[in-house]
Image: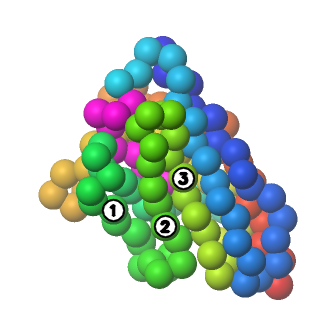
Amino acid sequence: QVQLVESGGGLVQAGGSLRLSCAASGQTSFSSYAVGWFRQAPGREREFVAVITWSGGITYYIDSVKGRFTISRDNATNTVYLQMNSLKPEDTAVYYCNLGTYESGHYYPDQYDYWGQGTQVTVSS
């Protein structure tokens, strides 16, 4: 069983920054997984935001966050981070992390579909 815990969310003004963390625990080979960050705004479907491969050598971002968000990982502590700068009101959402694979430009959640409880990010204008 794998547990994912997201943290670091909060309320910030537009232009501000937050650093989200995703900590994995339990029976997991964390370092063998790619890790994706997703977000879900009220009334909208969950949206893929960014991914980092198992080694950290490859990262990918959706266009709307490119240049503002940075994903990184520390396999020694089973933690992935999402540094979010220049935040905009449209970044407001619950942010989730997920374990999976990243192949040929596509992210695939693990068959066991591991998700945390999410962390709320609210950006005021």
Near mark 1 (Cα within 10 A), the count class, few <14, some 14-19 or many ≥20, is some
Identify which residue is drawn at 45% across, 56% down: 72
Q: On screen, 87 above or below 111?
A: below
Eyeballing the image, is 26 above or below 17? above
Specify the amino acid type for callout 2.
Answer: Thr
Q: Is residue 37 left or right of residue 118?
A: left
Residue 76 position, x and y percent, is 44, 34
Q: CA distance from mark 1 to mark 3?
A: 12 Å
Q: Which residue is mark 1?
A: 59
- Name the residue carrying label 3: 81
Q: Position of residue 112 (x, y in %)?
A: 39, 25
Whichever of callouts 3 and 2 sits on the residue coming sooner in the sequence is: 2
In the rendered image, the residue lying farthest to the left is 104
Q: Earlier in the sequence, mark 2 or mark 1?
A: 1
**For residue 16, side relative to residue 98 (left or right):** right
> Which residue type does callout 1 highlight?
Thr
Q: Which region of the structure is painted magenta?
A: 30-37
Q: 72 or 38, which lies in front?
A: 72
- Which quadrant of the structure image shows residue 16? bottom right
CB atoms of marks 1 and 3 within 8 Å: no
- Give the CA distance from mark 3 to mark 2: 8 Å
Q: Residue at x 44, y 48 (%)?
A: 73
Q: Is residue 96 left or right of residue 87?
A: left
Q: Is residue 55 magenta?
A: no
Label 1 element class: strand
Mark 3–mark 2 CB contact (< 8 Å): no
Mark 3 residue element: strand
Q: Which residue is mark 2?
A: 70
Callout 2 touching callout 1 (CB < 8 Å): yes
| Residue 67 can be seen in this image | yes
